[in-house]
Amino acid sequence: MNDTLTSKEIETNVDFLPLNGTDYVEFYVGNAKQAAHFYKTAFGFQSCAYAGPETGVKDRASYVLTQNKLRFVFTTPLQPEGEIAEHVKKHGDGVKVLALWVDDARKAWEETTKRGAKSFMEPRVEKDEQGEVVRAGIHTYGETVHIFVERSNYNGPFLPGYETWTSEYNPSDAGLLYVDHCVGNVGWNEMNQWVKFYEDVMGFKNILSFDDKDISTEYSALMSKVMSNGNGRIKFPINEPAEGKKKSQVEEYLDFYKSQGVQHVAIATNNIIETVKDLKSRGVEFLTVPQSYYDTVLDRVGTIDEDLKDLAPLGILIDHDDEGYLLQIFTKPVEDRPTLFYEIIQRKGAKSFGKGNFKALFEALEREQDRRGNL
């Protein structure tokens, strides 16, 4: 047996796009000052940095919020013209940037563009007295973009051009830790095209697939594939609608967002019971499942550390795989358009995404759709 690898085999085994994690998620919104206040109040984020007219930026205002390893940026246009204003007019408030933390932003941009990515931002060095950051970006589904961020030579609060934002109002955090995964909704028969994009352009692997038999109810269905980078720190499930008697929540999202886009951000916690209690007390609204769900759930998932009497009143769902189990719950959409929502997830070993809960979750989503008249 020949143990030497050919150069082609070596190339395919090397992770050409090493990612350290999610650097930030940027939202284009109609009123960033109010959005920032909402996320502080409802989700326990803290003030971090600000850019706007006072810092020399004339066309927008951006507020940066943090919580543990989470970094959310809310950006609003200051005039009715321009790309940000058009994005908000078309989509409502939504995710524009899924930024990825890298050691070498130039190389990340070169490796992805030579493999077919459309450039959003050529590599550029941004400097101030705190050091320098290198950023570059590519387009992905819809109007969403990935920006590669290299910040090893920077000591400022966020990026050059931002100043520290201090506030007397800083609610306690809610135990939210980091981005577990981000889910994208794409159009009919487009999932495999975007799976191929992440495989070919970014070197991701398809680690899980769900078809319309896995994710369906009496009325609607969807298909989903989970894409993961080499070290597993970045996971992007991609959904597309599937045929059903009525409109699926993916179709509803596409109708109201007016294109493909980020459907939800899943955020990790180490204590989902306390986190959900805290978030509910702050006004965050969650989807609910019938209490009958808890009558048989342990028959399916086996022994868990938590007591069902603590999980059931909160509507927290449970699922398992070969490596353990997970606890998860989903918010209602956080805006008036039924588009973006959040998942709160606590993993107790499980690497999966709650396949056993899909039916209960979709029925809960359909009840909300029906109330809106969109089912």
Image (cartoon, helix red, strand yellow):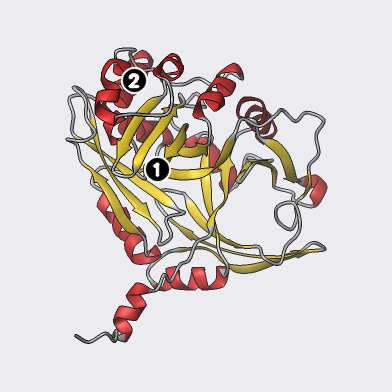
Q: Position of residue 34 (x, y in %)?
A: 67, 29
Foreground mark, 1 or 2? 1
Tell me the CA gap for discs 1 and 2. Answer: 26 Å
Q: Position of residue 308 (x, y in %)?
A: 40, 18
- In the rendered structure, the answer to whether residue 343 lies left or right of residue 4 reads right
Query: Which element type, helix, strand or loop, lies under badge 1?
Result: loop
From the viewer's side, name the closer residue of 255 and 312.
312
Of labels 1 and 2, earlier in sequence is: 1
- In the rendered structure, the answer to whether residue 325 lies left or right of residue 38 reads left
Picture disc at residue 177: none
Measuring 56% from the left and 72% from the top, which residue is drawn there?
106
- 10 Å crowding of disc 1: few (<14), some (14-19), many (20+): few
Quadrant placement of the C terminus: top left
Check disc 1 and give the amino acid type. Answer: Gly
Is residue 90 something that shows in the picture? no
Measuring 29% from the left and 24% from the top, which residue is drawn there?
298
Check disc 2 and give the amino acid type. Answer: Ala
Picture disc at residue 349: 1
Figure quadrant of residue 101 = bottom right
Is residue 114 something that shows in the picture? yes
In this picture, is 14 found above or below 251? below
Identify the residue under disc 2.
364
Figure quadrant of residue 116 = bottom left
